[in-house]
């Protein structure tokens, strides 16, 4: 194939370890929320989330309810909102830094310098994506990306989402190379006629798909697709 015009990247399991979310971000929010609820009780966003918890579970202790949801990893509106507020405060204060896989930033720099467009597609919101890439151990790397896309473009297991992103960027969908650790997402992108490659990070214990090419890191992607790589 020819060199892609756009490389579209998933985050969790692709550019950042799955463990970062579960072993760093979730515990950070769990530890930060009691103080956040106490000290910023008048913040309208916090007030609204707490009110919503009360509507869902009348008479409950909001903090106990939050802990219960977190223990079950529930994706529920007020919990997501409060976690988002805690993470924003953590990243902005410097208490939290995103630990990307070490091959990611060097490789993305080489690809960008070669004129390849780069974009993010993650189920985390665009603001969460910017927060994460804005506060990495390598500093603010948001400038590497030409676009940030989330579920507003559609689900990651839906081929139409990849066509929509290609249209938005202004490239042919066949000129997009999508990188993810999840087979079903790669299936959808391949159905949309993107080139795809699975990241099988040993640290994440990813199971290789038997239908798509797979590599263990971004230099592996460069080798497989004939892209410039890191010397
Ligand atoms: Mg992933």
Image (cartoon, grey):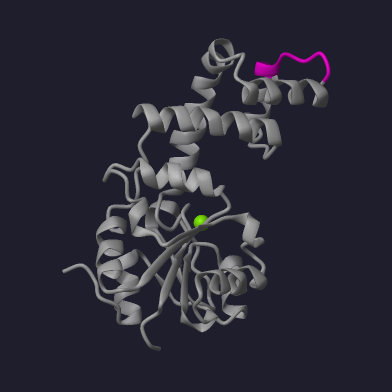
Depth check: give the residue in front, 48 or 102: 48
Number of disc labels? 0
Vertical relation: 164 (above or below) 144: below
The residue located at (49%, 64%) in the rendering is: 180
The residue located at (50%, 21%) in the rendering is: 31
Quadrant of the rendered structure where residue 116 is? bottom left
Where is residue 191? Give x, y as percent: 62, 79
The residue located at (46%, 54%) in the rendering is: 11
Where is residue 23? Give x, y as percent: 45, 36
Depth check: give the residue in front, 40 or 105: 40
Q: Which range is magenta?
A: 58-64
- Residue 173 part of the magenta-drawn span: no
Where is residue 192? Give x, y as percent: 61, 79
Q: Which residue is the extreme one toward the top?
A: 38
Vertical relation: 198 (above or below) 76: below
Depth check: give the residue in front, 35 or 12: 35
Q: Which residue is the extreme one toward the bottom?
A: 1
The residue located at (60%, 19%) in the rendering is: 43
Depth check: give the residue in front, 1 or 172: 172
Q: Which residue is the extreme one toward the left?
A: 231
Left or right of residue 48: residue 8: left
Quadrant showing the C terminus: bottom left
Where is residue 128? Give x, y as percent: 50, 43
Quadrant showing the N terminus: bottom left
Vertical relation: 204 (above or below) 166: above
């Amino acid at each position: 194939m020819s060199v892609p015009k756009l490389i579209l990247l998933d985050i969790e399991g692709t550019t950042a370890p799955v463990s970062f979310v579960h072993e760093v971000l979730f515990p950070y929010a769990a530890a930060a929320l009691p103080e956040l609820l106490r000290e910023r009780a008048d913040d309208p966003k916090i007030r609204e989330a707490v009110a919503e918890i009360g509507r869902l579970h009348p008479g409950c202790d909001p903090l106990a309810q939050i802990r219960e949801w977190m223990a079950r990893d529930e994706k529920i509106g007020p919990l997501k909102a409060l976690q988002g507020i805690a993470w924003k405060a953590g990243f902005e204060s410097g208490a939290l830094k995103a630990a990307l896989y070490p091959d990611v930033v060097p490789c993305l720099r080489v690809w960008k310098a070669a004129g390849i467009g780069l974009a993010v597609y993650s189920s985390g919101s665009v603001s969460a994506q910017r927060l994460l890439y804005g506060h990495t151990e390598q500093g603010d790397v948001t400038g590497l990306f030409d676009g940030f896309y989330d579920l507003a473009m559609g689900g990651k297991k839906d081929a139409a989402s990849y066509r929509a992103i290609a249209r938005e960027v202004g490239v042919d969908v066949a000129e997009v190379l999508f990188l993810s650790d999840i087979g079903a997402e790669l299936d959808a992108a391949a159905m949309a006629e993107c080139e795809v490659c699975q990241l099988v990070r040993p640290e994440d214990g990813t199971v290789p798909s038997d239908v798509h090419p797979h590599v263990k890191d971004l230099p592996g992607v460069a080798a497989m697709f004939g892209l410039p790589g890191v010397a």
